[in-house]
Amino acid sequence: MLDEQLTARGIRSARVLAALGRVDRAYFVPDTLRPDAYADRALPIACEQTISQPYIVALMTEALELSGSERVLEIGTGSGYQAAVLAELAAWVVTVERHAELSREAARRLYSLGYQNVSLIVGDGTLGWPELAPYDRIVITAAGPEVPPALWEQLAEGGILVAPLGPPESQDLQQIRKIGGQPLVCSLGGCRFVPLLSAAGASDEPA
């Protein structure tokens, strides 16, 4: 997986590749899909959500440019796979999931693997988690038309936010730096994610 799907497609960060090597994706997919755990595609999980393909996880993680000292906010815990990768690379990870079932299962997996630097929150991801803001990095693992204002406010000055932005059919994965309070955008390429939903169940719309 590391050689064929990640390195061959341009992932260069040695820290990211090492983290992906340490986190076993098979542990985060449904038992019936374990034979496909290392396939280069998204796989379905509970609550009509997905676990992203390894390349996308690596690309988003690399774009966060983690050195190890950062506090990271993840929106969309899902299976907990991305959170585990982030926990390998950052000082602390706060991950918000609107589905209590997914959050409970992710917590079970993460804690059973020994991760102690992850806080799992059941809540509305479009609102972030202001109690622990500001965050050095924010990663949004679901798609919306633009960055929810609350998340932008919770990103520290000089921080990086990575998110798939655009219409439901396809999105542009973007790395956005907060410089002087303004966004500096770098496109990472096309992608397709499940929609970012508020706790009420409606697709997030910018304020």
Image (cartoon, rainbow, N blue to C red):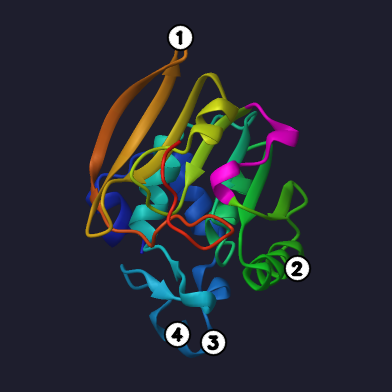
Quarter of the picture holding the C terminus: top left
Residue 195 placed where, x, y %?
39, 59
Give the mark nearest the N terminus, 3 or 2: 3
Does 90 sit above or below residue 30? above
203, above or below 207, in the image: below
Q: Name the residue under label 2.
A: 112
Query: What is the three-letter code of the residue carrying label 1?
Result: Gly
Q: Do the residues labelled 2 and 4 touch (CB within 8 Å)?
A: no
Q: For mark 1, does the 10 Å Cα neighbourhood hold few (<14), some (14 to 19), or many (20 or more) residues?
A: few
Q: What element carries label 3?
A: helix
Q: N-terminal of the two: label 1 or label 3?
A: 3
Q: Residue 31 carries which label?
A: 3
Tell me the CA gap for discs 1 and 4: 45 Å
Location of mark 4 (residue): 33
Q: Residue at x 41, y 23 (%)?
A: 177
Give x and y (percent) for residue 182.
Answer: 40, 16
Label 2 vs 4, first from the N-terminus: 4
Q: Are marks 3 and 4 in contact (CB under 8 Å)?
A: yes
In terms of image quadrants, where is residue 178?
A: top left
Q: What stretch is highlighted in magenta?
A: 125-134
Q: Indicate the secondary structure of the residue bearing disc 2.
A: helix
Residue 168 included in the magenta stretch of the image: no
Q: In this view, does 84 lie to the left or right of 51?
A: right
> Circle 1 sits on which residue?
180
Q: In which quarter of the image is residue 163?
A: top left
In front: mark 1 or mark 2? 1
Q: Is residue 89 visible?
A: no
Q: Percent from the top left, x then y, of residue 53?
A: 36, 63
Q: Residue furthest bottom?
A: 32
Q: Which amino acid does label 2 sit on?
A: Ser
